[in-house]
Amino acid sequence: MLQCDKVNESLPVNVTDEVIQQNPEFSKLLNLLSQHINSDGTSVQAQKDLQQAEEELKHEKHNWLMQKTIYREVEQLLMDYEIKSQECSLSSEDKQFQAALQECLTMAEIGDYVDCNPEPGSSSTLLGLTREEIQRQNPYKKHLPFLQQKLLPDIEDRLRLKCESLVTFHDPDNGTESDRLTFAKASQLPAVIDSEYHELKQMKAKLNKEKHRKDKQFWLYYQTLLDSLSLLEDLICQYRLQNQTEHDTVTTEWLVSKCDGLCLKIRLTELQILCETYTVETCRALSQIRKHLKSEHAETETEYTNVSQALKAYESVGMGFDTLVNEYSKLKNEVENKQWALSEFQHSIENKDR
């Protein structure tokens, strides 16, 4: 059984121990193939070439990322200078440094567009220009050593702070350590991340194998559970639901009878309350009240009819009646005002005589 597992792990095959025992020559052939073919089906030489290409690609990626990081830091540094200039005026030295750095960065970016031909072996360039000709147009070419002398410490400090931030993010408990120890951990952070990455890949592969084994157990348990549920359903339908139906029918009939009895009791209580409320004396008093209300209602109806007829008579007069009413109201108001003025005048005369 161990030989079968060894063959299955070294080659992309799935043979049983019985096949290997019945075909010993086939087993030897598989062992010879395992020296030239990997477990994923690729040849050993192709695997070596692939590993070498991956190492070269990793090296090129490292160089590109390093240059990209420095380029981004220079851009951010220029952006910081621009923001600072908006907040307060820069010194003359900072202004000269910003202008020179911006010009050098622009010239370097222009040089990236010179080789515009997609063919790798072609020597043609954009407008026939070369990187050397573009760099000769840089007015700050002579000041590059001064720029590097001032720029490199700033870039190193900014990168150091970012590395320390990454270490703190990776290990939050690292905040109490010294800056020198934190920077030392930052230099080891790629190796630590790579180690953790490979460890996670190994754990993932292990979990996949464990998952495959557990999947088989799961489907076995799942089928057993389905069989148990089917048996339980038969038992419930045969023994539980039939008796439950009879019990529910009896309970329903009892509840209906109880509800009918309660309704009759409520009706009896209602009739008793009506009999106690409306006695012979109460009915006589209500009858007298009804007669009084009828007479009052008849008088009100008669009064309403008279008022309606009077209003219709007034309306038949037409628009002239409204004018007469308004003039009468004005004259009445004037008479009242003059009577008040005469009474006041008479009082004033009597006061003078005294």
Image (cartoon, rainbow, N blue to C red):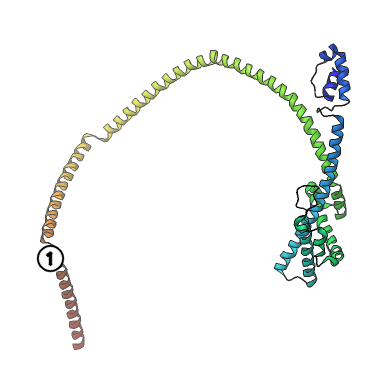
Whole-percent x and y of residue 183? Answer: 86, 52
Foreground of the two, 15 or 326 = 15
In this view, the residue farthest toward the top is 22
The quadrant in which residue 201 appears is top right
Residue 113 placement, left or right of 344: right
Foreground of the two, 185 or 297 = 185
Q: Quadrant of the N terminus?
A: top right
Residue at the spot 30% in from the left edge and 33% down from the top edge: 273
Q: Residues within 10 Å of mark 1 (few under 14, many from 20)?
A: few
Residue occupied by mark 1 = 320
Residue at the spot 85% in from the left edge and 22% down from the top edge: 6
Residue 9 placement, left or right of 243: right
Whole-percent x and y of residue 320? Answer: 12, 65
Q: Quadrant of the C terminus?
A: bottom left
120 in relation to 267, above or below: below
At mark 1, the secondary structure is helix
